[in-house]
Amino acid sequence: MNTDASGIAPRTEPPFTRDERVELTPANEVELAVALAAASGLERSSRAERGRWLRAIADAVEAYRDELVAIAGEETHLSAARLNGEVTRTATQLRFFGDVVDEGSYLEATIDSPDASLIPPRPSLRRMLRPLGVVAVFAASNFPFAFSVLGGDTASALAAGCPVVVKAHPGHPRLSRRITSIARDALAAASGPADALRLVEGMEQGTALVEHPRVTAVGFTGSTRGGRALFDLASARPAPIPFYGELGSINPVVVTRAAVATPAQVAGVAAGLAGSFTRDGGQYCTKPGLVFVPDGAGFEAALVAALEGAADGAGVTGAPQRLLTDGIAAAFDRGSVALAERSDAELVFAGERAADVASPVVVATSAAAFVAAHEAYLEECFGPLTVLVRYGSDEELALALDVLEGSLTASIQLAPDEDVAALADRLVQVAGRLVFNGWPTGVAITWGQHHGGGWPATTASVHTSVGATAIRRWLTPATWQDAPAAVLPPELADGNPLGVPRREDGVLVVPAG
Amino acid sequence: MNTDASGIAPRTEPPFTRDERVELTPANEVELAVALAAASGLERSSRAERGRWLRAIADAVEAYRDELVAIAGEETHLSAARLNGEVTRTATQLRFFGDVVDEGSYLEATIDSPDASLIPPRPSLRRMLRPLGVVAVFAASNFPFAFSVLGGDTASALAAGCPVVVKAHPGHPRLSRRITSIARDALAAASGPADALRLVEGMEQGTALVEHPRVTAVGFTGSTRGGRALFDLASARPAPIPFYGELGSINPVVVTRAAVATPAQVAGVAAGLAGSFTRDGGQYCTKPGLVFVPDGAGFEAALVAALEGAADGAGVTGAPQRLLTDGIAAAFDRGSVALAERSDAELVFAGERAADVASPVVVATSAAAFVAAHEAYLEECFGPLTVLVRYGSDEELALALDVLEGSLTASIQLAPDEDVAALADRLVQVAGRLVFNGWPTGVAITWGQHHGGGWPATTASVHTSVGATAIRRWLTPATWQDAPAAVLPPELADGNPLGVPRREDGVLVVPAG
């Protein structure tokens, strides 16, 4: 195959034969990547093979950790500590999806035996999920490992049996190429199909990917504007495909009056918030961007103290951070200045403003002003900024919560034994994950995780991009009716030879471990 | 509430108060229906209540069976036998979703206990699906019971806890109103929320429903053209919502050479096909509309004999049938004439053409002609028509299968012990249900059923409109992190007091029945 180890077709060499000099346009670059991915045969691999391949990729990423962290540091300005943690997270996630495919319940294997007495009569029906085919994954800038080339979208798609064409994020091109090459080599060394992972770069290539007839689904993490444009493309295709986008998120936090009844409580909540919204320059989709605080609790002074203490060296929370890209830095500057200069807002804290770093910014407003101008306040400002909304009464808080849009998370800071059931019921309408006495940053990779929410947090609230069920985005059901044993997948065979959890005549049966 | 028992706001009476005479426009008709549905409180009901309500509706439908069948017969021209069967199917389906909610595994309850040693650390995470909110259901014409007001979309949505606003099909308005009224009375009599089911009528009302900000998802069964238009509306909303549409389907059948090696086999397969494509006037989304038959097997003569025998009184297969609506009858006439008059096709059979009935039509063509003009041949012709595609070799068959689009079903007629694994692998790329030595009409309501396929069979191949998992369309995940016990749904409580199947620290646990 005339491509280099990174899986990118070289721009100076013809992709097909030496005699037939084909110029690589964005469209035929994508054509080549999709064709090679489709030809990889990943769909026909066994679950055991895919589990092994995912672990081989995880091992390779950790083996090249130092080199990868160094490249990522140069390209993203994130700290080595943060990037090392992210490498571990990425490897853990790849191995986790290995466990998910090994366990096998994600297949939803279901067996109904025939019953002619029913209306309508029931034939033998056996159902299972199968991979959709080649999928496209758009990498994010803010997690150069965990939401990029080998992030959760890719890990879950490969686990499902779907070859992946990744659209690299321009914020870390060298890292994207290098990690693709490492993963492809690891696949090949484990007797797997290297072409199950391909990389393309460039805006036009991204568009061509979403429109390619053989691409069956798209995973995306990024801005609301970019995500909406691609969602619209996917929906407008002659044959539309699912677009699983994780777009902006404001992550509201409600601090109850009882939670900040004493100065010690106020200081504790303020310190927690300071740490969460400034972490790694506030460049998280789960950054708490909107905090409802009770009037007169002294919360603002405590937050300023926490941020100033940090700037004085007591912690890292207030430290300036060079943002991921110049574009993000410029947008942060624009967004924070616009909020701070609003006539209905008040600047509570602003760190030093320097040429190429961003410092924390805190803006406050009243619940009434927030409701009146909620569209402006709900616009995500990526970076170390949070907005405090002061509320007087529960009624004022309720009115303010009514204007919220979909979000990945919502958090409640409450007092011990405080009854927040009604508040939680309200917030679960808004967010996919409710956090109690904690902060939304940090998304564990588990069976029960949900990373999604209503628009604009995700393009449809029925999917997650983190956690075991992320695999379901890349699968489609098939039912075999009265099928001869020879055509059935082994997971649907009589006697359950592979020992997967199955529903048999309506009853979930989990084989003894 | 100033609306009649049918749940339709009366057009001559003001919907709000007698003093404030509001004129009912399509938009405020929908506004009223959605507001009342949202206020019904169905989301807050327990699974036990919803199971009871679904069974109460099922009982009521059966109690009014004779009246309902009589109205349906007048409006749809379907036979009393067929309509009675459909009433039973509808009641069975409502009770089946009662069983699905009782069993509770559809909630996907998942519990992860905290583990601070992981990277990232794992808090306590508890995940479960919850109802999306008010949903819209567009009724179909061809199943006035089973895919209409109380069809599978409504049954699964109510089971999920989502209030439903149905857009009535204009093909059976009186039936739609009467059955809505019966269901609402049954809900009220069982102490349930009657407004969890509302009915609206009219095209503009349908559009307003899809665009209504409080509508969270749409279920649709109907034509590709109508479905595409509504899908586009749902996708273009400021906050897009999932549109679960079941559109056209051609349902290819492959008859292998070995399956028709003897005259008895040929006659058997031909009789089966004759019965399936003409059943109830061929007005099924699963009608076999395209049949690949081996050249020279004598299949056409046998099919003609089967249809003529039927017309002679030997069966009902060839009998003329008045179609559901004049529009469908006109489209059938146009479509069948256009196919029969093609220069690359041959008219194999045409029953008597009379003013207001449709008779079976069979058209044949070669595999080469089919491939060359596949767009014309793949257009669904709703009614008693099927197209035979004659193939010579396996290679010719393979080329023809390559141009197929997504379909609800694909069927294989094979000989005993014949190896059709490769053919089945090919067809599962096309269709959501593979039928072996059977016919696709008749869709059992079971745990393992799948009624979906790629575009244009369904708007996304990841959902079904028949079978237990249809409930998942109306649900969204929520995860509670470090939540106090008081805010958790009972299905996520410690000790599993409601005894639902749960995943606990990665292991599926099914409580002993």
Image: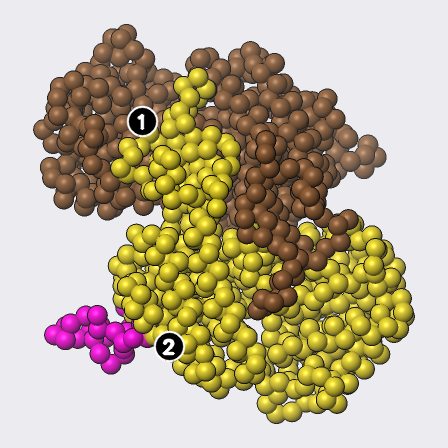
Chain colours: A yellow, B brown
Badge 1 local density, few (<14 within 10 Å), some, or many (20+)?
A: many
Which quadrant of the structure image shows residue B108? top right
- Kindly identify which numbered label has been placed on residue B439: 1
What kind of element bears circle 2? helix
The quarter of the picture where the N terminus of chain B appears is: top right
Horizontal arrangement in the rendering, residue B343 relative to residue B431 (left or right): left
Q: How many tags in the picture?
A: 2
The percent position of residue A385, horizontal first and vertical second, equals: 69, 76
The residue that appears at 26% across and 12% down in the rendered structure is B310
Measured Cα–Cα span from mark 2 to mark 1: 51 Å
User: Does the magenta segment cover residue B314?
Assistant: no
The residue that appears at 62% across and 39% down in the rendered structure is B500
**Secondary structure character of the magenta stretch overall:** loop
Horizontal arrangement in the rendering, residue B116 relative to residue A203 (left or right): right
The answer to whether tags 2 and 1 share a subunit is no
- The residue that label 2 is drawn on is A177
Observer-nearest of A503 and A209:
A503
- Identified by mark 2, the residue type is Arg
The quarter of the picture where the C terminus of chain B appears is: top right
Q: Is residue B250 visible?
A: no
Per the rendered image, the range of residues in magenta is A1-28
- Identified by mark 1, the residue type is Trp
The residue that appears at 57% across and 43% down in the rendered structure is B509
Observer-nearest of B240 and A497:
A497
The percent position of residue B371, horizontal first and vertical second, equals: 19, 44
Observer-nearest of B334 and A128:
A128
